[in-house]
Amino acid sequence: MKRVAFVALSAWLVVLFLIAVGLDATQEWTVYQRRFVKSLNRDERRGLPGGIQQIQVKPLGRVDRCTTCHVAIDKPQLALAEQPFTAHPGDYLTWHPPEQFGCTVCHGGQGLATQVRPAHGEITHWEQPLLRGPLIQASCLKCHGNLEEINAHVPLLRQGIQLYDRLGCAGCHTVHGFGQTVSIDLSDMGDKPWQLLDFTFVEGDHTLAQWIDEHFREPRRVTPGYRMTELPPGEEEIYPTFMPNFGLTDDQARALTVYMLSLTAESLPAKYTIPQTPRVQPAGYATAVERGRAVFQKYGCAGCHGEGGLGGRKNWNAQLGEEEPSLVYVKMTYDRDNLKQLIRDGRQPVPRRDPARPRAPSYMPAWKDRLSETELDDLVEYLLSLYESQVPQPAPVSEPAEAAPTEG
């Protein structure tokens, strides 16, 4: 009886061993490696490592096994035209040796995984999925504080930063301590777990990058509104998001998405980072109006009042036409002292158009702790100048010429 049991258990162990060998032989990474080896001749196969490959980067606390499948990433002479057998484009590996940087610090994904979807981070509980295509530019700010040095390699990232400044996003949002607090702080937007976002109205993949991109293109579709709770039960209203629709092109939305993904709290060792060099101050402005225009741009006033102060954004139930006021006619309402006081103190909350409805979602924040007195004076001069520069002025009435005396 014992011998029968021993033989049965031994046979079962053999079966389990064969199953384990079979499973190991059909792992995704083994399939990829066999396909790649079949494409090589005998000489090319010599010295080619097999099995699971990994790069351990202790200073970054990362262990990346990406080269297990991407076997030719640093071997352009062996590379094929299809993934995962292509070589790394450009000379990036010359500047970023894999043994020093690994892969995931730039590309994202789950370094320890050896199956495609988990390795790319495209699973439910992994918060850093693979950055595909131009989205990889978002990683450059982790190390390169001075983008001027890599300007040609990060066109979308630079465009996103420029758009953020031009559209006046700092008027509502804060990034690393600069900006206002009307809306959320974006300093670590790139670290936001995508699982916390509402994808009900998102048409594409459920990733952080996709949510941000669609939100920039159609903010009131992706976040159609939020419920106000000031009214009695059963009478609550759904207010659309205050985030304006800037009419962005797909390229502009993608550029801003890259910039948002670059905003991360991840801290790398000092030896990996290149500090930002001091920005060159622009040449001095000739007039107070020009200096004030620069202040208007710097602090993101266009985010609510439109570029150049020419048109306000929609602000539901605000007293002045349910929108942030245009600043062209500010001269007709305020003198210098009153305008300076309004900017210093802000206006919170904004007067309601209908007192029975909830207050407007946006408001004029106080700038007294953010603007210097000189900046405030220049900004006021600029705002008061908008009327003359934007409203056609009547031509001066010329005096009628006196009739020449007639001779006798």
Image: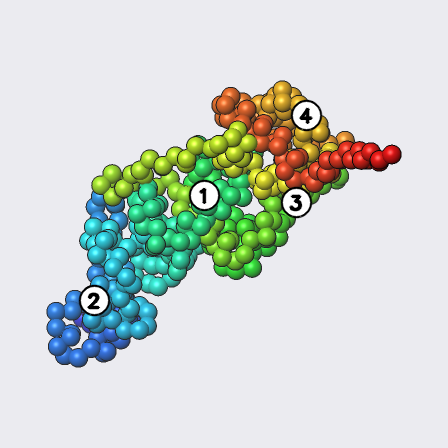
Q: Are marks 1 and 2 in contact (CB under 8 Å)?
A: no
Image coords of residue 131 (percent x, y):
39, 56
Q: Secondary structure at mark 1?
A: helix
Residue pointed to by mark 4: 334
Colour treatment of the image: rainbow
Amino acid beneath label 4:
Tyr
Q: Nearer the viewer, mark 4 or mark 1?
A: 4
Q: CA distance from mark 3 to mark 2?
A: 53 Å
Q: Secondary structure at mark 4?
A: loop
Position of the C terminus, as image quadrant, is: top right
* Count of all numbered marks drawn on residues in the image: 4
Say which quarter of the image contains residue 188: top left
What residue appears at the point 64 percent right and 27 percent down from the top-left corner?
Answer: 347
What residue appears at the point 16 percent right and 69 percent down from the top-left corner?
Answer: 48
Amino acid beneath label 2:
Lys
Closer to us: 298 or 356: 298
Q: Mark 4, residues whose alpha carbon is within 10 Å: few (<14), some, or many (≥20)?
A: few
Residue 154 located left or right of residue 310 = left
Q: Mark 3, residues whose alpha carbon is within 10 Å: few (<14), some, or many (≥20)?
A: some
